[in-house]
Amino acid sequence: MSGSVFITGASRGIGLCVTEKILTSYPTLKVIAASRSVHDSSSLASLSRQHSGRLILQPLDITDEESIKRAGEALGKEPCPMLFHGAALMHPSGKGENSVGRLCSEEMAAVMQTNVVGPALLTGALWPALRRAAKTAPSKVVAVGAGVGSIGTNAAGGWYSYRISKTARGMLSSPACLPARMPRNATVGRSSVLRVSAGNGKWQTVPAADVKALINDKGYTILDIRSPTEVSEVGYKFTWQTIPLAALTDEGPVRNPYFLATVKEAFPNTMSRMLVACDDGTFRSDMAADMLTEQGGYTNLSVIEGGIDGYLVHDPLTEKDKVKWQMEQQAGHDLSELVTGVDTRQASQKFY
């Protein structure tokens, strides 16, 4: 595989993680890292020094058509095997709407412009490069999803602008929405998401349909790594361990600095049988699994294919689960350290 992978939202969060993973795991690929603050990122500057000539820093305002056009031109005649949409906006105020009475056309338009319109235009600008790459191997258009974008699991309401934008962006990644004139061997859409980690040889994936038997018969426990927002919107089973890998903010995902330490507290035995899952079982699950095996030393860990969303299709939340989830929500937990970087928890507090 050769060419240049294009990553938006690359200066922080998931976009930065994907940038680093591709640079370290795919030596034949270049990376175009794009964001508004791309030249202000010390992390990207460090990666640029480590991978001389393979990392191109591209300023990009995903809400500006001219900026998107310039970003597309940055590829020249280079093939693009993957476009990764990592840039996102939760809400201009930083607080999702908790009622339809709070909806504002200007704020809603800003969320849609960042999360849907901009990515759609960028996909169009990079389409020739994606087609060039698809002549030799399937090319990918990848969007970071969220459980709040699921129509079927919307039990709580709220977060209207963000929720609608995530649903729309999922449809943007659907093959039905993309031009039919892509070369025959091209692959686009959520079902073809590239696992940039592809595993480190120390963990495996398991089908969502097999999870219930692994829990009941083999003693496995689900490690739910979704964000607090996703858990509050979709819910969870009381038997799961819910430890977020990242929190969602208006500027994008912010990694949980206490993730590994909290997992070690919950699973002190490195031979513990764990099933790791984010919302859809892709990038965050891979990152968590790599971290837990490489840094945590865990040896009996698998990732659920399709994530929590896929598992709940086979084993839905019961009424008892929903009651306990609602009670837990009312109790509340201090999550401010995920946003501010300051740990304000008491010694006994958990993230959920």
Image (spheres, rainbow, N blue to C red):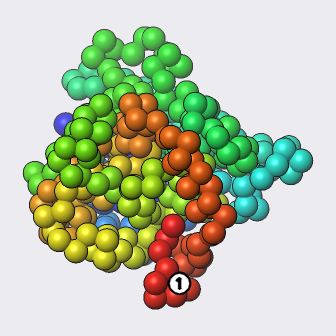
Question: x, y (%) of residue 205?
Answer: 21, 42
Looking at the rendered structure, the kind of residue marked 1 is Arg
Q: Can the viewer see residue 57?
A: no
* Placement of the N terminus among the 4 image quadrants: top left
What residue is at 26 percent from the left and 69 percent from the top? 267
Question: In which quarter of the view is residue 116 placed?
Answer: top right
Numbered-mark total? 1
Question: x, y (%) of residue 200?
Answer: 14, 53
Q: Secondary structure at mark 1?
A: loop
What residue is at 71 percent from the left and 63 percent from the top? 94
What residue is at 34 percent from the left and 57 percent from the top? 223
* Image position of 154 with respect to 111: above or below: above
* Image position of 173 with respect to 52: above or below: above
* Image position of 38 with respect to 158: above or below: below
Residue most toward the front?
320
Look at mark 1 in the image and give the residue it sits on.
Answer: 345
Instruction: Give whichever of 75, 110 is nearer the camera.
Output: 110
Indicate left or right for 252 with 175 as reference: right
Q: Residues within 10 Å of mark 1 (few under 14, many from 20)?
A: some
Instruction: Give whichever of 221, 191 is nearer the camera.
Output: 221
Indicate left or right for 276 with 27 as reference: right
Question: x, y (%) of residue 326?
Answer: 62, 55
Question: In which quarter of the view is residue 115 placed?
Answer: top right
Instruction: Give whichever of 186, 311 is nearer the camera.
Output: 311
What residue is at 59 percent from the left and 76 percent from the top? 334
Q: Can the viewer see residue 324?
A: yes
Residue most toward the bottom?
347
Question: x, y (%) of residue 226?
Answer: 45, 55
